[in-house]
């Protein structure tokens, strides 16, 4: 499985945008970029995914570099509820399982 | 609420015992996945079932087994339990019919297993 690299932790202020980076230099043409997050004491929660183009949904935006070797998850206006571990994951189109890395622990400061 | 339910929420048992964890997927989802989350190993994929058939296996111990029933609920059986099996066990489901990597998975709240 292609690997992703994320910072161990990040801090952001409440009500400000947050940009969570992810490097995936060995990504293959059939890999989708997925983001999940895990709030304290809860199961992982799907956030967003994309292949080549930038994607937006009600939770976040996903910006994918033109060469697809990196991506950024954007939370437009962080709230305290967004404090969680965020996982950037590559999933082959043919592969069902999710291989989780260590993720980025996001702290939101009031 | 993801729509995936897991029972029980908590389970405390002794070494050597056997337990069964239960998962009901979201309505309409044919695929069920089991994951284990421990402090030292993080979140690890164990096994996947699709419409009653085993579809993929991950780092699942031989002491562990799973099945998916005709009503699509799934059970994870853990036997000869050891202290190191203490962990959170999550079930997830997805609609997956093909192109698995394109479908999101919805996770349940987990079962916390404590082996003493």
Image: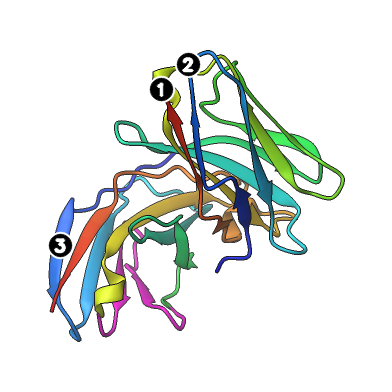
Which one is closest to the eye, mark 2 or mark 3?
Answer: 2
Same chain check for tags 2 and 3: no
- Under circle 2, the secondary element is loop
| Magenta range | A56-78
The image position of residue B18, as x and y in percent, is 61, 21
Which badge, 1 or 2, is on the more N-terminal residue?
Answer: 2
| Image quarter (top left, top right, bottom left or bottom right) of the C terminus of chain B | top left
Residue labelled with disc 3:
A10
Q: Residues within 10 Å of mark 3 (few under 14, many from 20)?
A: some
* Tags 1 and 2 touching, CB below 8 Å: yes
Residue placed furthest toward the right: B70
* Residue at figure coordinates x 77%, y 63% from the top left: B28
The image position of residue B93, as x and y in percent, is 64, 54
Along the viewing direction, whichever of A98 and B78 lies nearer the viewer: B78
From the viewer's perspective, tell me whether residue A83 is left or right of residue A67: left
* Residue at figure coordinates x 65%, y 57% from the top left: B94
Q: Is residue A77 magenta?
A: yes
Q: Quadrant of residue B79?
A: top right
Residue A107 visible in the displayed image: yes
Q: Residues within 10 Å of mark 1 (few under 14, many from 20)?
A: some
Residue labelled with disc 2:
B15
């Amino acid at each position: 499985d292609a690997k992703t690299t994320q910072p161990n932790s990040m801090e952001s202020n409440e009500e400000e945008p947050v940009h969570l980076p992810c490097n995936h230099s060995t990504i293959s043409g059939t890999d989708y970029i997925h983001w999940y997050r895990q709030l304290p004491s809860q199961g992982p929660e799907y956030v967003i995914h994309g292949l080549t183009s930038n994607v937006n949904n009600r939770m976040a935006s996903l910006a994918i570099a033109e060469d697809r070797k990196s991506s950024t998850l954007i939370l437009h206006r962080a709230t305290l509820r967004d404090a969680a571990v965020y996982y950037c994951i590559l999933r082959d189109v043919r592969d069902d399982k999710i291989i989780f890395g260590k993720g980025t622990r996001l702290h939101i400061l009031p | 609420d993801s729509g995936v339910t897991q029972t029980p929420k908590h389970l405390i048992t002794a070494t050597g015992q056997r337990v069964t964890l239960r998962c009901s997927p979201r309505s309409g989802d044919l695929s069920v996945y089991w994951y284990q989350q421990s402090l030292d190993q993080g979140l690890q994929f164990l096994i996947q079932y699709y419409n009653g058939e085993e579809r993929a296996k991950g780092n699942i111990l031989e002491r562990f087994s799973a099945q998916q029933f005709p009503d699509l609920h799934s059970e994870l059986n853990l036997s000869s339990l050891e202290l190191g099996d203490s962990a959170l066990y999550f079930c997830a489901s997805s609609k997956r019919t093909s192109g698995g990597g394109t479908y999101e998975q919805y996770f349940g709240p987990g079962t916390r297993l404590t082996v003493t």
